[in-house]
Image (cartoon, rainbow, N blue to C red):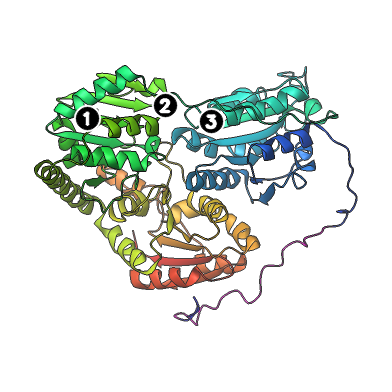
Amino acid sequence: MSPAAHHPERPMAREPFPFSPPHPRGAGRVSARRTTGTAMAEALAANGADLAFGIPGTHNLELYRGMAASGIRHVVTRHEQGAGYAADGYARVTGRPGLVVTTSGPGLMNAMAAMGTAYADSVPLLVLSPGVPTGLERADFGWLHEMKDQRAAADAAVARSVRPGTPAQAVDAVHETFARWAAERPRPVHIEVPLDVLEAPWDGEVPGPWRAPHPPAPSRAAVTEALALLSRAAAPVIVAGGGALGATAPLRAVAEALGAPVVTTTAGKGVLDEDHPLAVGPFPGFAAARGLMEDADVLLVVGSELGDAELPDRLAPRGAVIRIDLDPAQLHKNLRAALPVHADARETLTALAAGLAGPAGTERAAEGERRAAGTRAGCLEQAAEQGGRWREVQDALRAELPGDVVVVGDSSQVSYLGTAPFWPFSAPRRYLAPVGYSTLGYALPAAIGARLAEPARPVVALLGDGAFMFSAQELVTGAELGLPLPVVILDNHGFGEIRQNMLDRDIAPYAVDLARPDFAALAQAMGCHGVRVTDAAGAAKQAAAALTAARPTVIVWEVGS
């Protein structure tokens, strides 16, 4: 059945959007000249980069000179913020770094919200931009796109912003970034290449990637001490964050050996199959989960900062706290550890699983499962009180869509009050949403990035109308690419969360009820399909049909404020 079948009064766009021809005028005039930009493209490809998101501009053209020849596909988004979110979606669903290319000044600044999102949620992005020529830093001489200190501005939102001074340093900056990601907490990096360096000629070969260091392994003493604490524990609990995404198998082995319930953060959602009897789910800030964690005689925290976004009130566990993290700065953050283990999560959990005596005994396993089930039920009850209105659409979509679907949310109530608690996933990297930075406009471009990253995997964007309007222009990007992408918008007439926040503070709602366009008609004007539905079942059926369409389908359900 076609997506339009239920609503013949709202026809699909009659013809595909008239996109630019694939071979624009002048495409045949290609120079064999090599510059720092071509060398950087070769270095990126040598490190495994295969897809970049961005927008060409006056100053970044040399970054494009060698891109196609190096085998890097480039997707032009309609805004640099969209490029950053698309690269973020690519990175989250694959675990590989996302690549963003901007021009100087406004281009880079447009991507800053995405850079901050990636930093807060530990997502590896490499953002490349040009900068003012060497010697003109902070000169304020009226250069096009000039900023007082562009590198410093970017540095405030990323792990580090570097400005290489020579062509060789620019290539080395690429290699260093990928090498460090292999052993450090994955966070965004910005490389600003001075325009004179970017355009400088490059002679000879481009050196290959740096040999990546191994991530830190746990010390024998730390493993021994952790095993002693865990083996004596009668009521252990595990908290798994985004740092555990690559450690699913040993995490499950440790949980089963201990009979330990597993609470995840949103970033760690699915790291233990959420249908597993020891899985509590992504509820660290909920009362029942807090009680479970604080009552633990040993609390094992893997790859989480226990941040304010999900734990606004600090934990006070009665027992010993073991923290495992690749980032030493996290080992006591927000909760002091009795045993801090600075090491890779997978290696550490593998060592712990090997040192434990296999699966827990029947009585201990049953007790752990009972504790997990009771906690999960309490959390779901609280979730229903807070956001039960968003559950129906989750259940309907889950019933209609394939089991391996990737759901991309936003800073929308339907995401954090709906998808996060009510849609269980059997594996990680299936639910993508901004958490710490809590940005708006993430879902649509991130879904495009995820869909391009895993072409065989179904992807759905599920968000509110307020969030959608931050990046609606990226519908054109999805249409141009011919992506079969359902975009389900629950229209509650504006900024529903802020409206409720005002009411909770006895403030009359102000500046939160928004005029909205006809989203279905807007989608059609942008080369997509667009339909309206009147219930969750209709939204789910349209979303399932949209997975086989030749372009995105915007599905609008007006749920009211």
Sequence-earlier tag: 1 or 2: 1
Left or right, 519 with respect to 197, comes to left
Q: Secondary structure at mark 3?
A: helix
Using the image, determine if residue 69 lies above or below residue 165: below
Residue numbers of the magenta segment: 6-24
Q: Secondary structure at mark 1?
A: strand
* Disc 1 target residue: 299
Say which residue appears at 46% left-offset and 34% top-offset: 122
Left or right, 34 with respect to 293, comes to right
Sequence-earlier tag: 2 or 3: 3
- Mark 3: which amino acid? Trp
Using the image, determine if residue 21 lies above or below residue 496: below
Is residue 172 or residue 398 the one in the foreground?
172
Using the image, determine if residue 31 lies above or below residue 483: above
User: Which circle marks residue 181 in the picture?
Assistant: 3
Q: Secondary structure at mark 2?
A: loop
* Disc 2 target residue: 326
Image location (x, y in percent) of residue 506:
25, 42
Sequence-earlier tag: 1 or 3: 3
Residue 379 visible here:
yes
Report if residue 10 lies within the magenta region: yes
Residue 223 lies in quadrant: top left
Report if residue 448 lies within the magenta region: no
- Mark 2: which amino acid? Leu
- Mark 1: which amino acid? Leu
